[in-house]
Amino acid sequence: MTAYKDLSKNELKALKKELTKKFEDVKAKGLKLDMSRGKPSTEQLNLSMGMMDVLTSSSDLVCEEGVDCRNYGVLDGIKEAKQLLADMMEVPKDNIVIFGNSSLNVMYDTVARSMIHGVMGSTPWCKLDKVKFLCPVPGYDRHFAITEHFGIEMINIPMTPTGPDMDMVEELVSTDPAVKGIWCVPKYSNPQGITYSDETVHRFAKLNPAAEDFRIYWDNAYGIHHLYEDKQDYLIEILMECKKEGHPDMVYKFSSTSKISFPGSGIAAIAASDANLKEIREQMKIQTIGHDKLNQLRHARFFKDIHGMVKHMKKHADIMRPKFDTVLASLEKELGGLEIGSWLAPRGGYFISFDSMDGCAKAIVAKAKEAGLVMTNAGATYPYGKDPHDSNIRIAPSYPTLDEIKLAMEVFTLSVKLVSVDKLLAQAE
């Protein structure tokens, strides 16, 4: 294919006429398609329906501690659920605390606790003149929403093929005591699907923060969300690395079963050092009597152990893989060689990241919506919703059916072509 930038002005005008005709034909179909958020499909949710039958009115509801799960008790999670999530998170079970259904909620609470009470005796963040967080970009919009909600200044850290720009991270963390944290999705990152390299994880563990209350917010949301049996990324376990480097308290590690069992009814956990968890448990004593132990028991008995969970995730992969392959094949067929966009082929996770020509992302999303395709807002993968290049678009293939994805990608690639031609024609004026 000839790159669009190599076309003459008259050729671009002729191409625009042809593409506009195709777009109007697609628009006339009255499509209603949605690739806006990474929700599991109904088919995926159906995989966990057996969990609804694990506990019945005649079930023994006593957990391993001997506590009746219908009653009060066991503040930080029943043993069998802690073991299940500890194995999933690759940490000792004594180093995790189980919460409710959402790891996002745990992260929000962790930031809120730091704002109000400080971290392990440090000054509460609300009493400081300035609090900053480092934000690898493109990144996870819900992370950024938390820090923005609390008035925390966010600093963009460019992502590289091996993780965040660690030269920049090391410089800011070591010299600026106002930098209190960094958001990380270290495996199959949202939205690019990048997994941090061994060197990147080692450099994280060796950070020497200017702030004693600096923490790495390590959201391992997609730790076992592989797409391919024969191509799986490996991530070094961060808690152990920090401990080896003499920084055992520097990391909070988050995870949940939200995209493993049921997003609205999963179980979430934080893994951290003994000192960090002591502080968290003290706060929990005030906040709650305990989280939903029946749900914890349901998960533990349904999956039984990590092997059961891994087997379950292979079924998820069988549903997700064709959708990802369809998106990637469409991008390559329709846009490959045109030099109007680039993308990565992730081995896991929930998203595909697309980068358009600078200044085109918002227009592409708007054009797609005009033809009946709703996508995540352009800019959402950056703090404050402001992509300085207006180029990144997050594609979420999990929820639509395969047939819907084929139609959606027809709309998307056509929108990319049209907006890119307009951009090039404007530059030619």
Image (tube, rainbow, N blue to C red):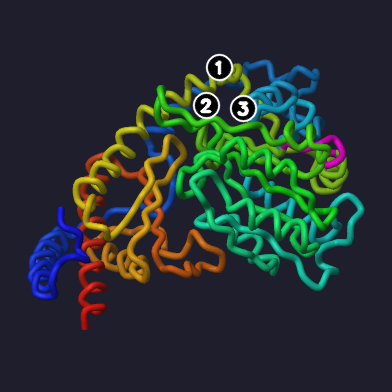
Which amino acid type is shown beneath numbered disc 3? Met
* In this view, 312 is above or below 265: above
Q: Nearer the viewer, mark 2 or mark 1?
A: 1
Q: Mark 2 or mark 1: which comes first in sequence? A: 2
Label 2 belongs to which residue?
52
Determine crowd level at label 3: few under 14, some 14-19, many 20+ residues with C-alpha closer than 10 A: many
- Say which of 324 and 347 sits in front: 347
Asked if the magenta segment contains residue 287, the reply would be no
Whole-angstrom CA distance, mark 2 to mark 1, is 20 Å
**In percent of the image, x 20 and y 76: which residue is there?**
425
Circle 2 Cα neighbour tier, 10 Å, few/some/many (<14 / 14–19 / ≥20): few
Label 2 residue SS:
helix
Q: Looking at the image, is 277 positioned above or below residue 388?
A: above
What is the x, y in percent for residue 159?
Answer: 53, 53
Say which quarter of the image contains residue 135.
bottom right
Q: Which residue is mark 3?
A: 88
- Of residues 417 and 322, the one nearer the viewer is 417
Q: Nearer the viewer, mark 3 or mark 2?
A: 3
Q: Give the residue at the far bottom of this rendering.
A: 429
- Res. 293 image quadrant: top right
* Residue beneath the point at 74% across and 31% down: 240
**In terms of secondary structure, where does tag 1 sit?**
helix
Decide: is 214 above or below 424. above
The type of residue carrying mark 2 is Met
Picture coordinates of residue 369 (x, y %)? 29, 64
The reply, left or right, for residue 335 in relation to residue 191 is left
Give me the residue at 15% from left, 63% from top.
Answer: 23
Residue 273 screen position, x and y as percent: 81, 36
Residue under numbered circle 1: 307
Q: Are marks 3 and 2 in contact (CB under 8 Å)?
A: no
As shown in the figure, which amino acid type bears the numbered disc 1? His
Range of the magenta residues?
A: 271-277
